[in-house]
Structure formats: C-alpha cells, structure tokens
Amino acid sequence: MLDIEWPFPTHMDFRGQKMAERLFQVIIVFFGLIGFLAGYMMQQFSMTIYSVLFGVLVSAVLTIPPWPMYRNNPVEWQKPSNSTKETNKNNSSSSSSSSSKSPNKDVRKPPKGKKDQ
C-alpha cells in the first residue's frame, strides 16, 4: 500500500462526533420545516425538496470535514507498561490451565426447525 501523508488532520474526537451528529440533525430539521412552510405557502412541493437538499448540502459542508471545533477534546491514551514479566506469567498460567480442557469442543446447539440446510 501507499503511505500518503495528508497535509491536514483527519481525526475527530468523540465529543466532536456527537456535536457533528447533533448539528447535522438540527440543520436537516430546520431546513425541512422551513421548506415545508415555504412549499405549503407557495403550493410547490419542489420548493420543499430544494430546501431540504440545500439543508443536506449545508450540513455536509459543516459536519463531514474534521473542522478544528470537532477536535477540542483529544482522547488521552494510557501509557504502555513495560511488564513483560506479567505477560509471561499470564501466558504460562493460561496455557497450563487450558491444556486440561479441550478448546476445540463445540458446545453450540444445532438450530431448530429446518433439517436440510
């Protein structure tokens, strides 16, 4: 694969995702209501459709790109621990306890109903 470095950030934090989703919903509902009222007053259903499509365009421009307002709360990752001894202890204890059990035993029940599938 090609490793391409983008000149702009492409991530969005969790709060930014929530804010973008809420903004998307508010814009769509707002333009839908305005379009419905304008279409009803003008007796033109096409006016309603154009208004909703314009709202979709506005909401896409405001919510799809990862604008800086969606990156205000970065995720704090934990630092990796250098506990290879703990990992080795866990691996050896789990392998000894799992050797007494048969890991390949199928304990699922067959499906009820159709027999010839």
Image (cartoon, rainbow, N blue to C red):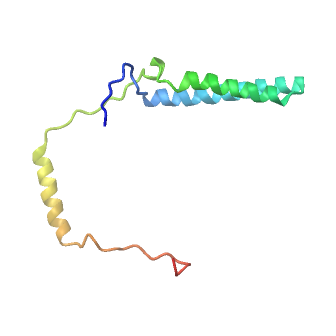
Q: Residue farthest to the left?
A: 85
Q: Is residue 50 left or right of residue 102?
A: right
Q: Residue at x 83, y 30 (%)?
A: 45
Question: Residue at the location (52% across, 81% down)?
Answer: 115
Residue 55 in picture, x, y percent from top left: 67, 25
| Residue lying at the far bottom of the rendered structure | 115
Foreground residue among 94 and 40: 40
> What residue occupies the far front of the structure in this picture?
2
Numbered label tally: 0
> Where is 112 relative to 19, above or below?
below
* Residue 11 as seen in the image, left or right of residue 39: left
Q: Quadrant of the N terminus?
A: top left
- Point out residue 116 in the picture as x, y percentages from the top left corner: 52, 81
| Residue drawn at the location 60% of the way across and 28% of the way down | 24
| Whole-percent x, y for residue 92 in the image | 12, 58
Residue 85 % position (x, y): 9, 47
Q: Which image quadrant for residue 108?
A: bottom left
Position of residue 6 relative to residue 80, above or below, is above
Q: Nearer the viewer, residue 77 or 40?
A: 40
